[in-house]
Amino acid sequence: MRVGELSKRSGVPVATIKYYLREGLLPAGVLTSPNQAHYDDEHLRRLRLVRALVDVGGLSIASVRDVLVAVDTRDDSLHNKLGTVQEAITQPGSAELDPLAVKDVQEFFARQGATDCVDVTESHVTHMLATALSAARSVGHDDFRNLLDPYLEGLKIIARADLEYITRHGSPDDIIEGMVVGTLIGDAVLKAVRRLAHGQVSREVFGQRPPD
């Protein structure tokens, strides 16, 4: 297909496609003439992935490039590739970390058997968790750390559902790409469904009567 058809099938403007090509986010097509190139379904799939990373994930071009490098790495286990991609699509917080919150995260990981979590800043994921607990402490909710273990147990159910969903795809590349898009969309879905659950449980616990 030509770039116009690629644009039509993906919903991405031609100018944006050309920008992604210049930035190396999309592999070049096969030249059929000095001014024309042919693109195939692999280009379409990659274009949709890039669009999801930018539009759904809000990632910068540099972060998108990191994700694509992880997706395209051939000499690593699927588990390690998934971890690499999770790091790439996680945006660490920029606020100063509370030392007590850092200690909370380290103790949490130790309870879970992850004794190598010494420096939380080595991982975007652990840094994000430490940032959240620091924010909780700053507003007087020091005990929020007590939710980490029950949160993890509940989220393992969701994680298994996520992996069952993405492993329906055939190739390792499809699994990785499914995880990238599924994580970004799943984060938004979880936020919305969690609020729905809060509403349902609140009705059960508090009812609809005004407080005394």
Image: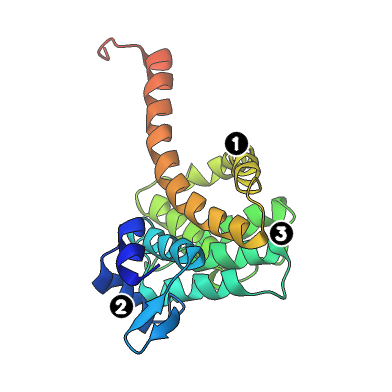
* Residue depth check, mark 1 versus mark 3: number of the one nearer the observer: 1
Q: Nearer the viewer, residue 142 or 38?
A: 38
**Separation of marks 1 and 3 at Cα, in angstroms:** 18 Å
Mark 2 or 1, nearer chain start: 2
* Residue depth check, mark 2 versus mark 3: number of the one nearer the observer: 2
Q: Which mark is residue 164?
A: none
Residue at the outermost bottom position: 34
Which residue in the protein does label 2 denote? 19
Which residue in the protein does label 3 denote? 114
Q: Is residue 92 visible?
A: no
- Whether residue 138 sits left or right of residue 121 in the image: it is left
Amino acid type of the residue tagged 1 in the rendering: Gly
Which residue in the protein does label 1 denote? 154
**Separation of marks 2 and 3 at Cα, in angstroms:** 42 Å
Determine crowd level at label 2: few under 14, some 14-19, many 20+ residues with C-alpha closer than 10 A.
few
Q: Nearer the viewer, residue 136 or 78?
A: 78
Looking at the picture, does residue 171 appear above or below residue 35? above
Q: Nearer the viewer, residue 169 or 55?
A: 169
Where does residue 22 sit, x and y in percent of width and height?
35, 83
Where does residue 172 sit, x and y in percent of width and height?
66, 60
Q: Quadrant of the N terminus?
A: bottom left
Give the residue at x 54% y 40%.
147
Please count the marks in the image: 3
Q: Secondary structure at mark 3?
A: loop
Q: Is residue 55 visible?
A: yes
Give the residue at x 56% y 40%.
151
Amino acid type of the residue tagged 3 in the rendering: Ala
Mark 2 or 3, nearer chain start: 2
Give the residue at x 41% y 60%.
48
* Residue depth check, mark 2 versus mark 1: number of the one nearer the observer: 2
